[in-house]
Structures are given as C-alpha cells and as structure tokens.
Amino acid sequence: MLIRRFNDWTDKCRLDKFLRSVLKEGDIVLSYIGFDVEYCIHLCKLVHKCGAKHVMDLCEFPYGTRKETSYAIRKRRIEEKKLLPIVDGIIPISDSLREYASQFVGRDCKFHKVPIMVDYKKYDLPDRSSETEIPYIFHSGKLQDQKDGILGMFEAYGKLLRDNDIPLRFITTGNLQSSSDRIQIEEIVERYQLKDKLIFVGDLSQEQIQDYLSKAMMLLSYRHDNRQIKYGFSTKLGEYMAAGKPIIITKVGEPMNWLHDGKDCIMIDADDEDALINIILRLYADADLRRYLGENARITCKNSFDYVAVAQHLKEFLSTL
C-alpha cells in the first residue's frame, strides 16, 4: 500500500512537470476524475494557468459505486463546489450524468455525450454456437450483485432448470472465492443443484472472452435499478452487441436511449426473474429470433458505438472549445 501511494505521488509530480513544459494556449487536456478530486482541481488550475482548456470525462456518478458514506458525500460535495464549476467541458456517458453535472458547471462549460465505445471490428465475431455440445448463456463481468445483478440471474437460471428439462449451461466470468456475494451464490448453487451447470471461468483474456461470446447462445445484462446503473453505461453491452448475439437487458439507465425492445434486444423490468425465465426459454426455442436480434444488435453497435464513428464526433466537439 505504501509503495502504491508513493508511486501515485511520483506519477502526479511527473505529470505536473510534463504539462508545465509542453502546454500552450489553445491545447486541450482530457482527464478522468477517478477518485482524487483534490488533484483534479489542482490539475484544472494548472491547465488554465498554461492557457489551455480542461475537459473532464464523466462516466459514473462521483463516488457512487460503493455504499454511501460520509467520506463519499464529502468528496462528492468538493467536486460539485470546486471542480465542476471550473472545467471547460464535460463528456458524460449518459443523459443522467449530464443532468447531474449541469447543476454545478459554469456558464461557458460545454457538454458532449459520448456513450460506450467499442472496437467493433475486434468483436464482430462469427456465430460458433453450433460448436458447443451443450448450449450456454454467457455473462461477462464481476461477480458483484450491486453492479451486475448476478444473484437474480443465478436464481432465475436455477428455477428454469428445476422446472424445465433442457440442456442449458450458464457460464460467467469472475472469481467466486473473491466475490463479496460468494455465500449467497453458493447457496443458490446448492439449492438448485447447479454444480457443473453454473460455471465460473475466472478472469479471462480478451481473446478468451471473444471465444466464449462467439460460442454463446444468448447473453445477459441483468442489472438492478440503482444509482450506479442509472448513471452509467456498461461497456460490455457494446461488446455483446458487436458479437451479434441475442441480448436480454433490464429497463434501466442509458441503454434505454439506444436499444429497442424486440429489435436489437429483449427488455425486461429490473428484478423480474419470471420474465427473465420466460425470455430465456423463448430464445432457447427460437433460432430465427436469436438471429434477428443478433443481426440488429450488430448494426446498432456499428452505427452508434464503434470508436471510429464516436471519435469523429468527439473531434468536432473539441474543436469548438
């Protein structure tokens, strides 16, 4: 921990020295706030002192990814009162974040919403689902219920297999032993006898994730209706879409502004396990629907989330500052 803090401090010193030596009037510095709001305030003032502009990437609700604590509230208030009012531009990932930040920015601050960005060509994968002996649902993400709704997914999957005699596995990334929800997950596995059916493959390389996506029958983004999800936008959803597979998502947050129920995904209400079970069964039985949803998801991703198209719009925005 001490070594990491020392490295963080020296990195900031080197960045300061670099910016002082190269920045000139008309330059633009794009930063991600992370979890050091005091340094971001310092950085913004340094950029302005050099005659440059400071644009801040805002991809999540400040200090909102964990439990609400007095520390998180205090840090958020500092950002709202001292950082947001002095930035020159904000790039929010969602409408909700734009509405939030607009309460605190200065009069001349400009906004440009940039959704998730995906390397479309990298995830434009062939459908290899026929190569698997037993078809499977795939979920890529952390084993964290607050972020990815894993307990509801696993519970629904267990009920589905209990009531329906179909060969269908569920493969998910993430390390079970290090999950904060490990006990609840193990209880679900025991309750529905999911050993060897619900498979945890750990942390994967990009190539391994692509292989699982290519062979999957369907994909899930089953997220809760909470603050973290309301303000954010999951990058893996774009990767799912580029892979051309049918996706089940919950009606929460920014994806509602980009995807269309019955065209490029199937939408269900958050925390509706019965609806999730019914849609999984429907997709399992209907290959034509799976192809239709997957093809349209691919098109939506290419048109809206491919980094090549997004970069051009971002370039145009930055030129207006």
Image (cartoon, helix red, strand yellow):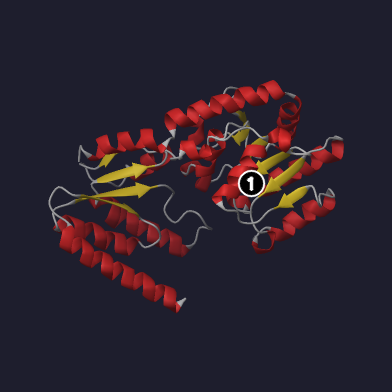
In the image, residue 228 lies at what x, y percent? 51, 48
Q: Is residue 307 left or right of residue 26?
A: right
297 or 230: nearer the viewer: 297
Element under disc 1: loop
On screen, residue 293 above or below 31 = above
Q: Is residue 214 left or right of residue 45?
A: right
Provide the residue designation for mark 1: 149
On screen, residue 289 above or below 159 = above
Viewport quadrant of the C terminus: top left
**What amino acid type should be assigned to the residue bearing mark 1?**
Gly
Residue 236's image quarter? top right
In the image, residue 133 lies at what x, y percent? 78, 39
Q: Inspect this view and state whether residue 264 appears.
A: no
Are there few (<14), some (14-19), or many (20+) residues within 10 Å of tag 1? many
In the image, residue 195 lies at what x, y percent? 81, 52
On screen, residue 267 above or below 181 = above
Q: Residue at x 78, y 51 (%)?
A: 188
